[in-house]
Amino acid sequence: MGKSPRHAETLMNRLEADVFPVIGHLSIDAVQTGHIRDIMLTIETRGASDVAKRAHQSIGQIFRFAIARELASRNPAADFKPRDVLAATESENFARVDEKDLPELLAKMDDYNGDALTRFGLKLLAYCFPRTSELIEAPWTEFDFDRARWEIPPERMKMKTPHIVPLSRQAVEVLRALRLLTGNGKLVFPGAKDKKRPMSNNTLLYALYRLGYEGRMTGHGFRGLASTILNENDFDDEHVDLQLAHMKRNKVSAAYNHAKYLKQRTEMMQWWADYLDTQLAKGRRALAA
């Protein structure tokens, strides 16, 4: 009820990809807790813990529906919680604010009165949600303004496969402003003392601390927020995971997969940037009140 057609289509795609191959051939009362656990652990192996949690939730909802209509006698998904099966994904180093706190955070980031490079870096962390090291170590040669793409080579990626970040209009605007400051050098974010080396990995983290978010938000936190919010707004799991560079890809297929679903991911990244701008406007109104 109240769900969009895209939500229904996305849910069915998830079930067909992850759930039906394991339990689709079974009668409903033949499904055991172990089947659901195995489904979740398989999903987790590709770095998609959020998807594994939603698989548990969806299966549980199906069983509750069936029980209410006397089509099933029990709900095996109710025997355990996702945290009983999945590895812990939260850590102090990856702290992040709740979605409801995002408007205030973005407004404070926008008003950051420290170094301009740091302020621009925070904006790009939000708009593009890369890993912090991927951002601060980036050379200008990785950015193509004409195609609105940021292409990161495999040697700079955690998964050691190439990665494409479609650039929203907002991200391109930030990068154009940055180019006026550092465009004559190799690095987008050179260090304050040695321009041939990137800024410190803690620069952006400490900026968040100065804004009052110590223990509440990190650079990595934008990745978690993007994952949660995009999935909750019915963007395809695989598109989100590919954009986060979570997908475990073998070297043979890496050159192909890094550009997979690029059109859909480009649309998703523009939606995300527009969403952040909407939240920023809310935060500005709240701080001005």
Image (cartoon, helix red, strand yellow):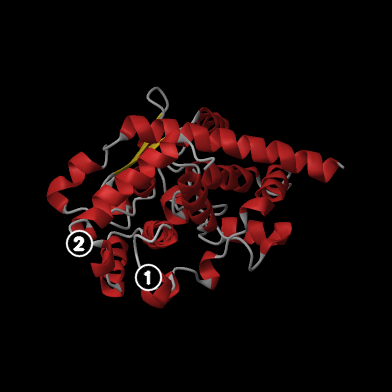
Q: Under tag 2, what secondary structure?
A: loop
* Picture layout, residue 228 above or below residue 40: above
* Picture layout, residue 108 above or below residue 176: below
Q: Nearer the viewer, residue 243 or 155?
A: 243
Q: Nearer the viewer, residue 36 or 156?
A: 36
Q: Is residue 156 visible?
A: yes
Q: Nearer the viewer, residue 206 or 66?
A: 66
At which x and y percent is residue 199? Answer: 52, 54
Q: Amino acid at mark 1?
A: Arg
Q: Is residue 149 visible?
A: no
At which x and y percent is residue 232? Answer: 50, 47
Residue holding disc 2: 26
Q: Is residue 43 left or right of residue 22?
A: right
Picture quadrant of residue 111: top right
Q: Residue at x 49, y 32 (%)?
A: 270
Residue holding disc 1: 74
